[in-house]
Image (cartoon, rainbow, N blue to C red):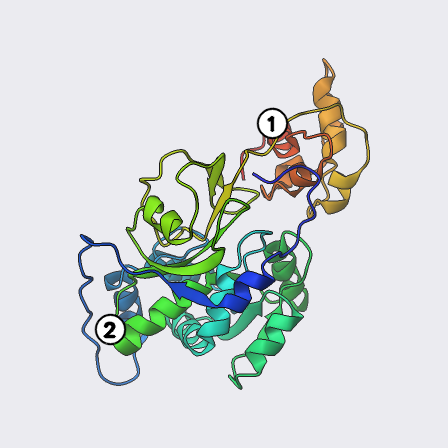
Amino acid sequence: MTGHGVKLGQENNEILKRGILTMPAPKGLPEPSRLTVGRGEPGPRRILRAAEEAGICDEFRGMPLRELLESLAESKPQVLVARCFDDDPFACASQAVLREMPDKVADGLALAAKACGVPKTRIAAASRKELRIYKSHGIPQPAVAAGDSTPADFFLLRRLSRGGETAAFIGAQACAALSDAIRLGEPQSHTVVTVSGDAVGKRANVRVRIGTHLSALLEFCQAPSRAGFICIGPALTGRAVRSRGIPISATTRCVTVMKKAPKQSTFACVRCGRCEKVCPVGIIPWLVHRELEANTPEPLLLFHVDNCIGCRVCSAVCPSGIHLEEEVRSAARMKGGHDA
């Protein structure tokens, strides 16, 4: 969605300063049923059951939390990390959740780790500033800053694994929802969405009822009834939509509304090397592009294409507007690889 050659970084200080706004629930949405809260400290089975009954979904993976926790119990990582950053130039919902409910995020993370038998936990804040804000609350849960490199989730996992420990992520909102389910008997009925873009009158993080139509959310944020471009999801991997009748789900982390659609002009590769510098797995996208342009590409020059993680950073920084990530995946298929 973002224009090519963009500077990847957070542009959300003003949004974070406003805090999380709560949107009134639209009429017609059924009231969620409360859960039965058991007595005493819950064990793994009760935590898993509560995650399922509460309908909790991990906002990053898009899968039910119970399924995620059961899969982690099988893969057995040594560290479970609450992902409290969005790694996106437009979204900051995860940061806002950690700022406003750090106790719930930490509690839910501990419950999730208990459910899947992971011995260690970490809170992953977006930056050193967010890390200081978190630590100011005096919560004993260990924490780490994700850093500025994109994709931050990839680099953070690699950094955590240098000590020989494997790590896995769980979303900040999923953690907070699990805490509410166990401690208060509340299902996951709301989600926090970043609504941003140059066509939005009230850019904000909004707590909105799941099932609310996109049109109602945009009206709450003073977006025009007609806009040039609407994107749901992260700037690099989100999807453009035309219908405003789409319901908000637990995985709707960001909505960006622009006055005009981003230009998609494509020019010849200038061999600037930006794509090579930002690739986290050592692929040389400009070289892949050159080989694919040839009538007989040399497979031996398609270095590491099977390792592509689909972050699309190469495409975002390309000043020529070339869809390099698509070409890398095409090269992987040519070598007998498959989509990540």
Residue 88 in view of the camera: yes
| Mark 1 residue type | Ser
Q: Position of residue 38 (x, y in %)?
A: 21, 79
Query: How many discs mark residues in the rendered view?
Result: 2
The image shows residue 317, relative to residue 211, as above or below, that is: above
Q: State which quadrant residue 271 falls in.
A: top right
* Residue 157 in the figure: left or right of residue 137: right
- Quadrant in which the N terminus appears: top right
- Determine which of the numbered discs, if any, sits on residue 185 in the image: 2
- Quadrant containing the C terminus is top right
Packing grade of label 1 (10 A; few <14, some 14-19, many >=20) is some
Kind of residue at badge 2: Gly
Judge from the rendering whether residue 252 lies leftward or rightward of residue 10; answer left or right: left
Where's residue 242, x and y in %? 40, 33
> Residue 330 bears which disc, if any?
1
Question: Label 2's element?
Answer: loop
Camera sees residue 84? no
The answer to which of 153 and 295 lies nearer the viewer is: 153
**C-alpha span from label 1 to label 2:** 48 Å
Q: Which of pointers 1 and 2 indicates the residue nearer the eye?
A: 2
Residue positioned 44% across, 74% down in the render: 101
The reply, left or right, for residue 202 in relation to residue 14 is left
State the image coordinates of residue 316 (x, y, percent, origin top left).
66, 40
Query: Which residue sits at x=43%, y=42%?
Result: 224
Q: What element carries label 1?
A: helix
